[in-house]
Image (cartoon, rainbow, N blue to C red):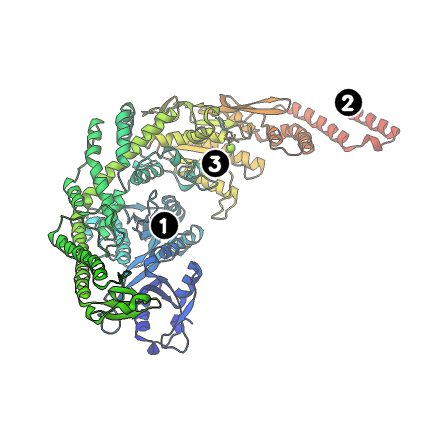
Amino acid sequence: MKRSTVDREKLSPMMAQYMELKDKYEDCIVFYRLGDFYEMFFEDAITASRELELTLTGKNAGLDERVPMCGVPHHAYASYIDTLIEKGYKVAIAEQLEDPKTAKGTVKRDVIQVVTKGTRLDNNLDSKNNNYIANIYDFDYCKGISYTDVSTGEFFCELLEKDNEDIIREIVKQGFKELIVSDNIDRELINTLRVNYGILITITKDIYEDYEYEYIYKDIEDIRLQTTIKHLLHYVLDAKKGDLHHLKKCEIIKKNQTLLFDNNTKRNLELVETIRSRDRQYSLLWLLDKCKTAMGSRYLKNQIENPITNKKELERRYSFVEKISTEFIIRDDLRTVLDEVYDLERLAGRISYGNLNARDLLQLKRSLKALPKIKTLLENLEYDKTIETLDEVTLLLEKTIKEDPPLSLKEGSIIKDGYNSELDELRSISSGSKDFILNIEKEEKERTGIKNLKVGFNKIFGYYIEVSKGQKHLVKDEYGYERRQTLANCERFITPELKEKENIILGAEEKIINLEYKLFMDIREFVKRYISKIQEISKIISEVDMLQAFSIVSDDNKFVKPNLVDTHELKLIECRHPVVEKVIKDKYVSNDIIMDKNTNILLITGPNMAGKSTYMRQCAITVIMAQIGCFVPCKSATMPIFDKIFTRIGASDDLVSGESTFMVEMKEANYAISEATENSLILFDELGRGTATYDGMSLAQAILEYIHDKIKAKTMFSTHYHELTVLENNLKNLKNVHVSAQEEDGQITFLHKVKSGSVDKSYGINVASLAKLPKELIKRSEEILNIYEKDNIKQETFTQTSLFEFNTEEVKEEEKTNEIEEEIKAINPLEMTPIDALKFLYDLKQKIEK
Ligand code: ADP
Ligand code: MG
């Protein structure tokens, strides 16, 4: 049965209310609260029962047929919602707004919150990652982009005057979970993002037009930026429907302050996850993340994805890292206290929104208690920022919140004794009466002589006196017992005295729960005033935590402080790939990477598996480490500050967009050469191998020449076209280097050592034999290679005619021997008569003499 075809006139009042609500939340699955359950109906029920493996049943709603329905218990709804959200759905939670016991007619219900992937601020969020929701507002000639992490309050915006491809690049790199777009946007762009990258997208026109949250954008002058922010704000506020004053003032992203690279580079360099398994383990982030707090880890990830270009700031970070390393005892203390600090940033979000419980406030208290110590340690380290300690908040929380409060706020046991006299009084009444009741059991036993008489409690009858069947006859009228319940083996009674005490207890308990709830809310309101201060503290702690991690990692792995220079000189002495080194330890062979003022391009040759790709990657990784303020995996490092990094590494097809390797390669190459400046770093790993040899080689050469003459970016270019190494003679800023290997009896050993000059052999077959291909196959390939190598000489020289001279005589000579060799190969002596063989030999000799 479809919702759209239902005759609404016939519906029961409850279902009519549901329909009206659902109309407003067409694109959400509506969780509709009915007593102890959240129920879903119609198509929502069908989808949810499938996705959540729930039983699909039906509900009478006044129609001829029952309406499809499924439900989840209200106390367990969070995990069901999580599952739906992870699968890309949006969930609207419709609550009962009045107490069903006292409500007249149908209980009022409304949606209190829409939960979506990008707007979460619950405590099940992955603590090591930011959770961004973004907006793209299309102004035809340019696009406004804004994004926020609702859980932490961070808010950013920028303008992009770029085509769809660049927009996609940007969106994908930032890893946005959810996108809100203006309704005039290019549908093709939206489709690509939705289908190829699985981003949840909502198209709306609505713009925020109120004053309450104006502070977020009012200092931003550009109206277009304001528009994208307001567009995003409308969606977020409408979904959360609560207090979001922890959202910070929006910051404009300044591209020239960050080291830019795209998502492919992020992947290729395995910055935050590995390419194959998409695991954090063995990524650069994994290596560097010795942070103690979730905030530190998130900040570090953020920095790795967006390194900076400000020399002063980088040097400030280096000197603090150095300082922490020298003061390693203070560092130990600092690490120990940072352990006490919880996720303040996200706590601030939940304080503001209100979805926090007493345990969250305990976490806040423990974190705040660590601040004075942190403050002192930072002073000792001469750190240039100070943190406020918020003693009055700590004090209040210390006085009020019990050490082991329940998760729910509606059970009491939250507030400590001695904070509120009314509460203390109610508690003593309640517990006094409880003692009284316990006494009754003793007294009644004595009075009646019934040995196994018990006093018990259940929700239906309250307190009762229980007498077993065997002793029932001992109950006399004069005791004043009133029978309430007869069970198989006992009878239950009440007395007026018992009920009187019960009223006091239950009355007091209800009052206690209500009062504790109110006190909790007051405390929350008090803490709320400190949200922006808590956010400032979080920011400092994130940075300090990251820098202490750098100090630890740098000490453990012998990293050195980079020397940043304003000239175009890159000199990395004994540089290593920090992650590979971590795995293979001292087997790692360090290498120098030297590109002085007069060297912009390193042309790298060497056999497969020699370490070319690793050599290139370690250069980029070193640059990135330097530009987040970390020390670098070298013996010494002199380097300029780079503005952008471009990479084309590996020949994997772009599975997502379904383009061929070669097409992807060329697009990437184009992206690099159109965007790179002389301050950029380009890594091209075996560019051109996705097409026929001569196409590939020619393109590679042309690209090298172009970079050499026009762009002048520092470039590492590995190739297996040995023919390209002659370029060194013509391109004055290009230098050949090769990764050496040793061959002995056909066995190859990789030395992984980079040396100047080029190699003339690719050892492909040796490598193949290492891979244990069948012996006869290897042998045959050696034969074929021999032919090719001879053949090649003529073509090789041909491709170089335009650039280099060659000797025509030599070529002819070669051609002839080849012909003869071919002829010999073509015959089978065993099948020839002696006469034929003699004639063949005679002919050959004639040919040679000619
Ligand atoms: P290529 O790109 O030349 O085919 P790779 O860079 O992929 O070679 O490296 C092949 C393997 O050699 C890597 O898996 C790595 O384990 C090892 N390797 C690379 N460089 C080094 C090095 N400098 N020291 C030790 N082992 C290395
Ligand atoms: Mg390689």
Closer to the camera, 521 or 441? 441
Q: Is residue 203 above or below residue 746?
A: below
Side (left or right) of 723 relative to 343: right
Image quarter of the C terminus: top right
In primary-sequence order, the first of circles 2 and 3 is 3
Labels 1 and 3 touching (C-beta < 8 A):
no
Is any atom of residue 142 visible in this view?
no
Whether residue 45 sits left or right of residue 20 in the image: it is: right
Queried on whether the Cβ of the residue with tag 1 lies below 8 angstroms from ligand 1, the answer reads no
**Distance between the Cα atoms at labels 1 and 3?**
27 Å
Q: Is residue 702 left or right of residue 401?
A: right
Task: Kindly identify which residue carries mark 1.
Answer: 177
Whichever of callouts 1 and 3 sits on the residue coming sooner in the sequence is 1
Instruction: Residue 772: give x, y in percent of width and height.
Output: 63, 33
The residue at 41%/47% (across/down) is 165
Element class at badge 2: helix
